[in-house]
Amino acid sequence: MAKLTKDEFISALKEMTILEIKELVDAMKEEFGVDPSAVAVAAAPAASAAPEGPSKVNVVLTAAGANKIAVIKIVRDITGLGLKEAKAIADNGGAVKEGVDKEEAEQLKAQFEEAGATVELQ
């Protein structure tokens, strides 16, 4: 069997379906005892040597927008507050969650923005 070059291997991957690629990864795990996705994930943090800003942030709701009911539901899901308290945050704004990882804060911000709210990360 001829040895594939890196470019040939990549072009072969482009022609595969997601299911075929998953089966390939599973076969690599079985054959070599290594999870290729774990190697890629482990290498990613080493690439970013300088942290960007604080690692913990506060998620602050500044405006609920037109769809206030959806925003109240999100606040309740995230905080566990009652309806009255969640409505007060939606009406007046304020900190929804404090001291969360930046990645989680970005996910929460995306949830609120999808519902039409305006959120700041501080």
Image (tube, helix red, strand yellow):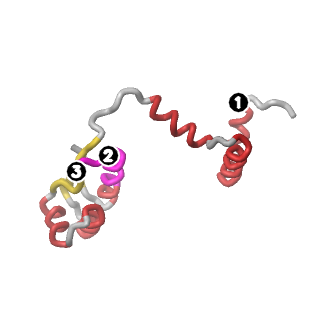
**CA gap, disc 2 and disc 3:** 9 Å
Q: Residue furthest top?
A: 49
Q: Tell me the kind of residue under disc 2.
A: Asp
Within the magenta stretch, is there residue 109? yes
Q: Name the residue under label 1.
A: 6
The secondary element bearing badge 3 is classed as strand
Residue found 72% across the figure and 35% down from its top: 9
Q: Is residue 45 left or right of residue 109?
A: right
Q: Name the residue under label 2.
A: 101
**CA gap, disc 3 and disc 1:** 46 Å
- Residue 67 location, x and y as percent? 26, 66
Residue found 29% across the figure and 57% down from its top: 112
Q: Tell me the kind of residue under disc 1.
A: Lys
* Tag nearer the camera, 1 or 2: 2
| Magenta span: chief secondary structure | helix
Q: Tell me the kind of residue under disc 3.
A: Glu
**First to last magenta residue range:** 98-110
Q: Residue furthest front?
A: 33
- Residue 110 location, x and y as percent? 34, 53
Q: Mark 3 points at which residue?
A: 98
Q: In which quarter of the image is residue 34?
A: top right
